[in-house]
Image (cartoon, rainbow, N blue to C red):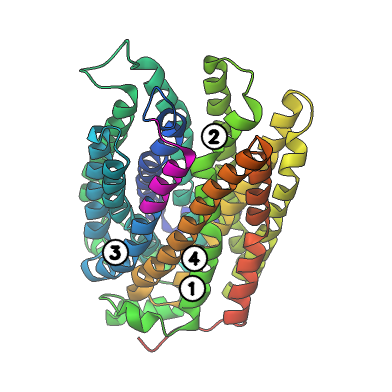
Amino acid sequence: MADVKTVTEKIGKYRWTFAALLLFSTTINYMDRNVIGFLKDYMCSAEGFGWTSQHFSYLTSIFTLFYAGFTLVAGWIIDKVGTKIGLAASLILWSVAGILSAFMGKSLGAHCAARSLFGAGEAGNFPSSIKAVAEWFPKKERALATGIFNSGSNIGAMICAIFVPWCLLTWNDQNLFLGLHGWQMAFIITGLIGFIWLIFWGKIYKSPKQKLAEGVISQAEFDYINSDADDKAAAESGDDQGSVSWGKMLTYKQTWSFAWGKFMTDGIWWFLLFWLPTYVKQQFCENMTPEDTAYTVMITNFIVFGVAIVGSVYGGSIPLTLMNKGWETYKARMTSLLMIAVVPLLLLLTQTAAGAEGMIGLVLAITIISLAGAAHQAWSANLFSTVSDMFPKKAVGTVTGIGTAMGGLGGVLVQLLAGKCEAWSIATTGNSATGYLIMFSVCAFAYLLAWGGMKLLVPKFQKITDL
């Protein structure tokens, strides 16, 4: 981290403004996404929608399916129209869809329709953000910049952990606001926040070349951003602009390496996002009052996603440290990923820890889940950076879209599996503990399997140069 500070003092730090902007957009993205996770128990209650957990898994799966499908298109469009327009359009679509969810009543079909549109909009966030990082940061800083903006996924979850229960308690059936219930206000308020961010994005974001021409950044910072030999040549020739066919991208092993990593691990994070509140309630809150249950869920989720922020930023700094010691980029990246992939094995102990007496079980289980969540975010920061390591900037959005689509497909399977496991466990044992044991076991090995597949596909670094 000291090397980043030294470089920043010498050449300027304007590029980190965009890491901050992307941090806020990702925070908003995950605030909007996480609302349904904290509404699950309300939706699945007699006082709420009267759904079952299986119904809820259909809702999260349909969102994930549309999110996955549209990332294929979104990544290509973003490479075509540029980062600024691409991310702005995505945010507008998902914010409007989020607000519409407040007016879908109790109908599962109506909510699935709104969530489908929502998924299509959110599909553009990560392809846009990764492309922006590739435009504004040299390779050695990309994982750190990605880790910073990706920590917004944790901040968004933390905010939801407090905000959604507060909405439900503040605007209940006896205390409505403009005739709207708490669950409706949760959708509306989170949806509106995105439009505030849009004002700043529209005013600030431009390419490094444009900012250099305006005198906003120095020549030294511009040169540093393009200090990698291939990026410098592309910037000078103008070959870093435009787009490439996503069909052509599928012919490269590097694309499939990234896609495999996303397919195996994205669903693990989404399992935590959508099911952690329910897990805490089912495993630890059986004898608590509704108020104590709400506070327990709020605090535990706040802790899990708070720790994940540390993992996201620290994980992004690991390859930077190795590269500053002279390590080649791909070796530093894959070594970092392997180190990180070992940590989720702790999840195998989650249910054993949860069985400890009293609050000790809760503390131990949440500690393990927090470490696994931090590891996922560290993994994600480095995994995303492999795209800009191996592909020219003009292909980053497309390849990120393909990988995110595969991650979404993996997410669909994980959501359906979680619903099936919970239902089977309750039907056969009378509780959900065995179902969660199965799910945590799946999560534990996913990262090592992902790393092994990536290494088999691309055993040595191979930069794509023929686009």
Give the camera-side residue of 223 and 105: 105
Going by the numbered disc 1, the residue's amino acid type is: Asp
Residue corresponding to mark 2: 278
Quarter holding residue 446: bottom right
Is residue 308 left or right of 463 when viewed as pictured? Answer: right
Is 193 placed above or below 208 here?
above
**Mark with earlier residue (1, 3):** 3
Give the camera-side residue of 455 and 279: 279
Camera-near label (4 vs 3) is 3
> What span is colored magenta in the figure?
50-62
Residue at image position (33%, 17%) is: 171
Give the camera-side residue of 227 and 437: 437
* Residue contact between numbered discs 1 and 4, judged by CB atoms under 8 Å: yes
Q: Which circle marks residue 74 in the picture?
A: 3
Going by the numbered disc 2, the residue's amino acid type is: Thr
Going by the numbered disc 4, the residue's amino acid type is: Ser
**Mark with earlier residue (4, 2):** 2
Q: Where is residue 115 in the image (x, y as percent from the top left)?
A: 31, 47
Camera-near label (4 vs 2) is 2
